[in-house]
Image (cartoon, helix red, strand yellow):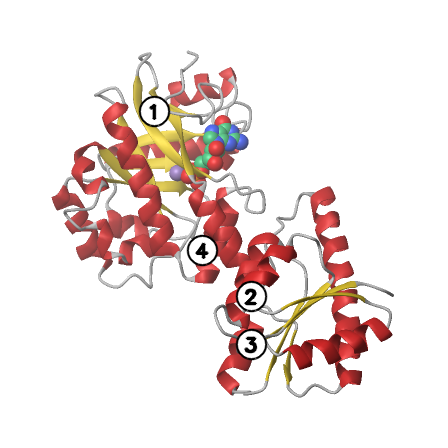
Amino acid sequence: MAGRILLVDDDPLTLFSHERALVGAGFTVQTANDGEAAITKVGDGFDCIVSDIHMPGMDGLQLLRRIREQDLDVPVILATGEPSMESAIRALEYGALRYLTKPIALGELVATVKEGVHMCALARVKRDALAVTSTYRTLAGDRAGMEATFASALGSLWMAFQPIVHCREQKIYGYEALMRSKEPALPDPGSVIETAERLGTLDLLGRTIRDLVAVQIPAAPPEPAFFVNLHPNDLQDEDLWDGNSTLVQHASRVILEITERAPLDHVAGLRDRISQLRELGFRLAVDDFGAGYAGLTSFANIEPEIVKIDMSLIRNVDTNTVKHRIVSRMTQLAHDLGILVVAEGIETPGERVALTDIGCDFLQGYLFAMPGKPFPEVSW
Ligand code: G
Ligand code: MN
């Protein structure tokens, strides 16, 4: 099995002997003397890249990250004459296929590159398969790949807004801000969040979202509120309370949604944090109510002004008597506590009629408007 190989090393003698061994084994080989030169070639689509770690300028680990901005699959083999446990761990963590110690025996080089070429073919077939089955998200497989796709998602992040309407009057009560990215490898908000969780970049994601919402608010009509989703991690980020942060300036118009789907028990001092948010002027909503963790501890700690009933309960609420009974009871109990009710995910006129009769306060769903660029029109 032939393949196209890129060799990167600042030592010309190493390059020469490695090139000769690999050409002798049937591979097509290109060489680069440093990381910068290598980067200009990566777009040519190699089947395996072998790079030195210690090089002037860009080192092998930095090169690996830059490669992942262009190619999520090509196996990278890193080699060093000064091996250390730390660099070995970092190399593998960042997705190097192998970590070799120089001088590399030529037989070992050829065998490792052969393995890399096979892995590359496998990775590319898998990615094609994922694109066809499409039920799976094509997450980058290693840390460098994840960093590259996450950076691209973050750079292309934009907020879609979906109107939330009064149940009886033809008026918009607010807009829910929903994160969208243009990065194809992270097509839905869930995959962006999952990647941020794995990379430990949730603070950055949350701040970016809040900044993007805040810049839209002055351009909106004066009345509607803004519903902004929080990740439990955001409740531990001081930026959320920082008087200078962008969203705090608009706190009186903002309702922070906290999902029932994620547990909040690891958020230290939750009640204090919630009351500080109220002091700043924010209101709070429990999101996805009925879909999440059993029990009401997070509900009790948040004491929300608003509860959003999960769309799994709303779907066919007009024909499904069990759902109808549950949603009625939830609405009644919320009202007893002085809490307003939003029904999410309304798609049919039948659901709308049923929820209006039940007494929900506000409705949100495709029936009224898809989430879209600020600010979508409502069809009543
Ligand atoms: O978890 P949360 O409630 O924040 O998520 C709302 C999600 O539901 C958004 O991704 C939004 O695009 C989607 N959504 C909004 N309205 C509808 C709807 O009427 N039907 C369905 N299936 N999804 C909806
Ligand atoms: Mn929400």
Residue 10 drawn above or below residue 207: below
Q: Which residue is mark 2?
A: 35
Q: Earlier in the sequence, mark 1 or mark 3?
A: 3
Mark 1 and mark 4 lie on one chain; the one further toward the N terminus is: 4
- Earlier along the polypeptide chain: callout 4 or callout 3? 3
Q: Quadrant of residue 331?
A: top left
The N terminus lies in quadrant: bottom right
Residue 167: % across, % down? 35, 19
Q: Which residue is mark 1?
A: 362
Residue 250: percent from the left, percent from the top? 19, 35
Which of pointers 2 and 4 indicates the residue nearer the eye? Answer: 2
Amino acid under disc 2: Gly
Toward which corner of the image does residue 140 lie, by quadrant?
A: bottom right
Q: Nearer the viewer, residue 263 or 231?
A: 231
For marks 2 and 4 on the same chain, the one whose residue lies earlier in the sequence = 2
Alpha carbon separation for disc pair 2 and 3 = 10 Å
Which one is in front, 220 or 10?
A: 10
- Look at the image and tell me whether residue 207 can be seen: yes
Residue at 70% from the left image edge and 85% from the top image edge: 104
**Which mark is nearer the camera, 1 or 4?**
4
Q: Are marks 1 and 4 in contact (CB under 8 Å)?
A: no
Q: Which mark is residue 53?
A: 3
Which amino acid lies under the numbered mark 1 shown in the image of this protein? Phe
